[in-house]
Image: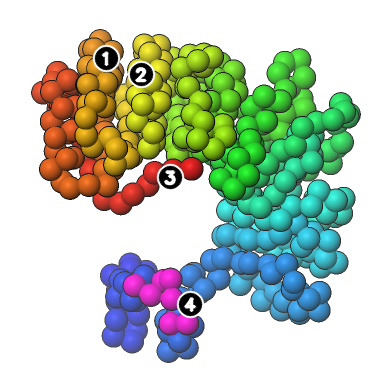
Amino acid sequence: MNRAVGTGRGLPFEIFDKIIDLVAKDTKTLIKCSLVSRAFYDHTRFYLLYTFRVCPVLQSAALAQLVDFWDTSPHLPTYIHTFHFSTVFLTEHDAPRVLYHLRSVKDAFMNDLVFDHFEHREAVEALAALPIQTLTINKSAFPSFHDFSFVIRCFPLLRSLHLFGASISATTTVTPWINSLPQCSPPRIEHLTITARSIDTRKSNTRLFSEFPAPPFDDNQPFRIDNLKRLEVRCANQTDIIRIGRFLPRVKRTLKSLSIIRVDNGVSSRGQPMPWVLGLPPLDLESIEDLTIDVGFKVRSYADYLLWWISNLSTAKAIRSITIRIAMALEYIHKEEDKQWQNVWHAFGLAMLGKESLQKVLVEFQIPSSPRNFFTRKRGVERECRDLVERGVMRVVVPNKARLVAF
């Protein structure tokens, strides 16, 4: 039936869709709407059943009742597309039955990992059979890189992996590969996001890059990197960027988008700045088409940081888009810093002259001061990069909302 045709009760489908879309995030209102009529119920269930969360303290009896209900109404769990769980769920007796019904799940959120929970083979096999394409891991510490590899291989259809709150401890001994389950295999990741350093502990999580197996030991990889197209690293400091630099040549054939955002302010201990330019080798950006970098609050050290990025761009032969987000401290608003940053932007303009593939440069200034101070700096950047501005390639703007983080 054409969607323009009415529902039989005086309203077209489009009206129902609009009403439900307006209250999509209000669960209580959605429940009330589902009780109005059959037509409202048909439209609200897509939102009401879209996400399934398993509470860590959920009683086994309640879980058994839920899966018994799904057995009698198997169409209901097909509306579930997002699954939130902690790994203790895998120890439940009815976990395999629950996972059997989640055949439409595409996105998964895993928290509070305990590696011993993956010893429950039937549940792990059921988990590996799900068509999960995006996995986000939070509040999880992997005892070793081998344990990390075991867990990731339980999601063989994965395409996007987000390690926002996951850390990998140092491997103390070399152990043989243990994930021999036939359903488990390394997924071909296309999009990888990692929080490199914990804001609370400053502990580095980039061991993934330093311990990632290289040929001829790539059979032990947690995931395949031969199709990695997008890499986003958050909260990285100098050590993390060095590790990333050693990893990039292995994905240079496929990687198109690189983001190094929310950078650590380079402080190794309280009040002691770490110079970015010392011992920081260049990055291989040959295949990168889309680059996003954040420049943080410490002006003097980060002028050097931006100059280092400019030197890297000399190898970026395919670059099409550059986004530079700058958060300026109050002390930058005045005095001697202006001359240093003029030199930086002059060097940037010169480096971009021969980039025929370049289509867009966006510079976002977040300055905690009056608009007059922003426009002064905006004009300074545009003056030093006049060629890019006149070609319509470069824009200097104030972001609609603050997105940078200081440590």
Question: Where residue 235 appears, x then y in whole percent?
Answer: 51, 38
Dot 2 and dot 4 residues touching (CB under 8 Å): no
Specify the amino acid type for callout 2.
Answer: Leu
Question: Where residue 157 appears, x then y in whole percent?
Answer: 64, 42
Please give the range of residues in magenta.
Answer: 22-29
User: Circle 1 sits on which residue?
Assistant: 347
Q: For the residues marked 2 and 4, what is the alpha-carbon distance in whole angstroms? A: 49 Å
Dot 1 and dot 4 residues touching (CB under 8 Å): no
**Nearer the N terminus, badge 2 or badge 4?**
4
User: Circle 3 sits on which residue?
Assistant: 405
User: Residue at left 33%, top 87%?
Assistant: 9
Q: 199 or 32, which is in the foreground?
A: 199
Dot 4 and dot 3 residues touching (CB under 8 Å): no
**Nearer the N terminus, badge 3 or badge 1?**
1
Q: 319 or 35, which is in the foreground?
A: 319
User: Residue at left 17%, top 20%?
Assistant: 384
**Nearer the N terminus, badge 1 or badge 4?**
4
User: Circle 2 sits on which residue?
Assistant: 307
